[in-house]
Image (tube, grey):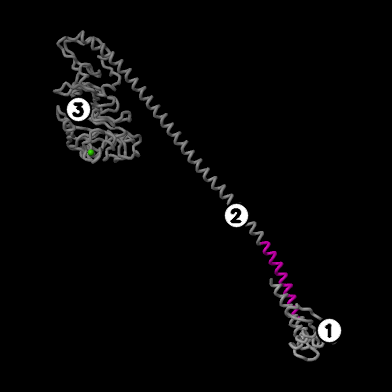
Amino acid sequence: MESCCHLHFLFLLLVSAVAWCHAGGCSDGSPADKCLKDGAQKSPSRQPEAKPGRCAYTFIVPQQKLKGALCVSVESTSANRSEVMQLRLELGRQQQQLEDLRVRLEREGAVAGEVRALRKESGTMNARITQLYAQLLEEVIHKKDQALEQRRVENLLLNATSQVLQMTSSYRELEKKYEALTSMMSNQSELISRLEKQCHLCDKDQPVKVTRGSRYDTNVSKDIGNDIQRDQSAPLPPTPSAQDPSPVPPTDPPFIGPWRDCQHLLDSGESTSGIYLLRPQNTNRLLQAWCEHSRADGGWTVIQRRLDGSVNFFRTWEQYKQGFGNLDGEYWLGLEHLYWLTAQASYKLRVAMEDWQGRQVFAEYDSFHLEPESDWYRLRLGSYRGDAGDSLSWHNNKAFTTLDRDRDAYSGNCAHYQKGGWWYHMCAHSNLNGVWYRGGHYRSRYQDGVYWAEFHGGSYSLKKVIMMIKPT
Ligand SMILES: [Ca+2]
């Protein structure tokens, strides 16, 4: 475009030069316009009249602009040689510029080509990047799906494992129950045959006495619907009467129970710890309990025991009333039995505990008894002594609460949170009927372990606990 302008400019220059020549170089010295007019007005026949040799070049210009021929006077050209030289120089300079422009144009053309190539390359790269991004996105989504699927499979596996464990546990429990039932049947058969023999031999006037360690009389069994009695599977202690079913001398039979409590048993000369048949005074209520003679001078009637988590203590009011568990393992004697026992005399309570490092402590209260069921077996407790710390006095004068009988001071039911039955307040400084966790410190949503707050706090589940009473 620029070169075109330059060409146009050159043409104008040439035309101007001719005009200048025409104006100043006419031989007759007439002015330019006159010369042109004359040229235009003179007929072609006059053209040859122009003196030959005076014009060296003749230019034909477009007729619509300039009419007639243009002549250049050689003389005037020679007269203005310096100007011509200038023009030539100018022309040379213009040509040089043209050449420069051409070179630049070529260079720029090359640059433009490169730019085009680069643009094309950039477009290709963009397309490739977009493609790669799409691939990456797809892979990310795919991997996310895989992770979800993996998690789902893991959950399924965990559920399946948990179910298998549950089934194994249920199977073992059933096996245990079967063994207990078999043992109980065998014991009952033995007892029946022994009683039959005794009945034949005993004096008709002598009241029926139950041998040590034997199960209660079938006639009184109707009075007590106690799980302890049903779960009983402990082997019979090796007593002379059990080993030797020989006839009891009718004349002077030793007193072999039932006893008022374990202190009575100890006073009768029996100092071996074990399961014995008891009958509180002024009642026909027969019950079995573990008598503990190896601790703190003996004579203790065990009312509660935890040692291995084999028994579930999250139970109903009726079960806490009648008692449950295994007499030679974990058990709860029963609130009704406790009421009758502690009503016959003045009793003290001893709570012995052991942590998972084997450290043993105790808390003793110099008086202990319960109010009747009509008053929700309210706890009445005396003064504390011991090295465990006092975590039960806070519960003094509180009613007993179970998962189905809420008598605590809390807006909800403490038994639901603490997973047991206790003389809950709001809620507990001690929770010895809670969940037995292995290892001590436990992680649970609630403080529901077997704990005694003054000994290791509420987040530590004790290994062994035994609650026992003895007359003062
Ligand atoms: Ca409540």
Instruction: Please report the residue visible at 81 percent of the width from the left and 90 percent of the height from the top.
Output: 27
Residue linked to disc 3: 336
Q: Earlier in the sequence, mark 2 or mark 1?
A: 1
Structural crowding at the residue carrying mark 1, measured as other residues with C-alpha within 10 Å and reported as few (<14), some (14–19) or many (≥20)? few
Segment tinted magenta in the rendering: 89-114
- Disc 2 element: helix
Q: Is residue 392 left or right of residue 10?
A: left
Structural crowding at the residue carrying mark 3, measured as other residues with C-alpha within 10 Å and reported as few (<14), some (14–19) or many (≥20) = some
Disc 2 residue type (three-letter)? Asn
Task: Name, please, the residue furthest toward the top.
Answer: 200
Q: Upstream in the sequence, badge 2 or badge 3?
A: 2
The residue sitting at 30% across, 21% down in the picture is 233
Nearer to us: label 2 or label 1: 1
Q: Give the Cα separation between the discs numbered 1 and 3.
A: 161 Å
Residue situated in front as seen by the camera: 252 or 455 = 455
At label 1, the amino acid type is: Ser
Return the residue nearer the eye: 90 or 50. Answer: 50
Tell which of 456 and 299 is nearer to you: 456
In the figure, 277 relative to 158: above or below?
A: above
The answer to whether 29 is drawn above or below residue 125 in the figure is: below
Disc nearest the viewer among 1 and 3: 1
* Residue linked to disc 1: 45
Q: Is residue 111 magenta?
A: yes
Question: At which x and y percent is residue 282?
Answer: 13, 23
Secondary structure at badge 3 equals helix
